[in-house]
Image (cartoon, rainbow, N blue to C red):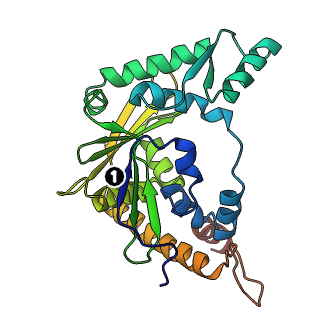
Amino acid sequence: MTAAVEVEAPRIVDGLPADEYHADKTSISSSGLRALLNPGCPAQFKYDRDHPQPHKKEFDLGHAAHLLVLGEGPELEVIDFPDWRKTDAQIQRDEAYLADKIPLLTKDHDMVQAMADAIRQHPIAGPLFTPGAGLAEQSIYWTDPATGVRCRVRPDWLRGPIVVDYKTIKDAAPDTISRSIKDRSYHQQDAFYIDGVEAAGLAPDGARFVFVFQSKIAPYLITVRELTDQDRDIGRARNQRALRIYAECESTGVWPDWTGAVTEIPQIGMPTWDTIRQAEEYLG
């Protein structure tokens, strides 16, 4: 496979602004690899990379919680209004965005403070995030040896060989988390971050990846989990396929959609489970 980018040695960057990290087109991140595979496709990935999406306000609470838990992120701007309906509240909100701050209503600021307090009091998550015991949001770059593709990861928190990933979620029940891992391909993120940390020499004896999920509903319950070995192996295999796709697309300049180059109209059916269920019910 022709290398998609110039081969370089591993590199660890402290203090790189998040905007610069996400705007880098010379390497690919975990979210990029996930976007290349179904239900995404290379064509959509390429468009989204070349046309960055505007700021999404629904992520503000998560970013604010990250700041209070990790100590890294944009400054918060507390807006003393009950909601955003008043013109003055909207003006202050927009001014905060222009100043690269995260605007939060007072009630939302109180909520993320309570979430951070819950993290600190948790018997497992609290010690993992002990201030001074780890490093927040280091940017790590390395080259995939099989494809020559330059890769990057940005762990939320790196405590020795342990990568701690903090995610806020509506419901942190284990069953909900299990579905999120499948729906958002977090098993790819797990494997990719472990590979990046190990490639950079930060875990000579092997890295671990720990998910910390926290509910955004009081009392802000927390679930800490490590992925099963089999799911991590599946995630790594998905990453390897996505890296080959990315390398090929960069090499040829062709970024196909879901169908690719065909001369006949393909068939499509219902999801396999639904086909089986309805065939048993109606075809007997």
Name the outermost residue toward the left: 205
- Residue 277 percent coordinates (x, y): 59, 65
Rendered image quadrant of residue 228? bottom left
43 on left or right of 34: right
Q: What element carries label 1?
A: loop
Q: How many marks?
A: 1
Rendered image quadrant of residue 46? bottom right
Residue for point 45% across, 57% down: 152
- Residue 79 percent coordinates (x, y): 65, 13
5 on left or right of 94: left
Identity of the amino acid at label 1?
Answer: Leu
- Residue 213 percent coordinates (x, y): 42, 37
Q: Is residue 165 at all visible to an observer of this figure?
A: yes
Name the outermost residue toward the bottom: 263
Residue for point 65% across, 26% down: 99
Residue for point 82% across, 15% down: 87
Q: Foreground: 220 or 275?
A: 220
Q: Foreground: 7 or 102?
A: 7
Q: In which quarter of the image is the C terminus?
A: bottom right
Q: Is residue 84 at all visible to an observer of this figure?
A: no
Q: Foreground: 124 or 136?
A: 136
What residue sits right under mark 1 in the picture?
A: 227
Q: Is residue 65 above or below residue 24?
A: above
Q: Is residue 208 above or below residue 216?
A: below
- Residue 209 percent coordinates (x, y): 32, 49
Q: How crowded is mark 1: few (under 14 residues within 10 Å), some or many (20 or more)?
A: some
Q: Is residue 167 above or below residue 282?
A: above
153 on left or right of 217: left
Q: Foreground: 90 or 229?
A: 90
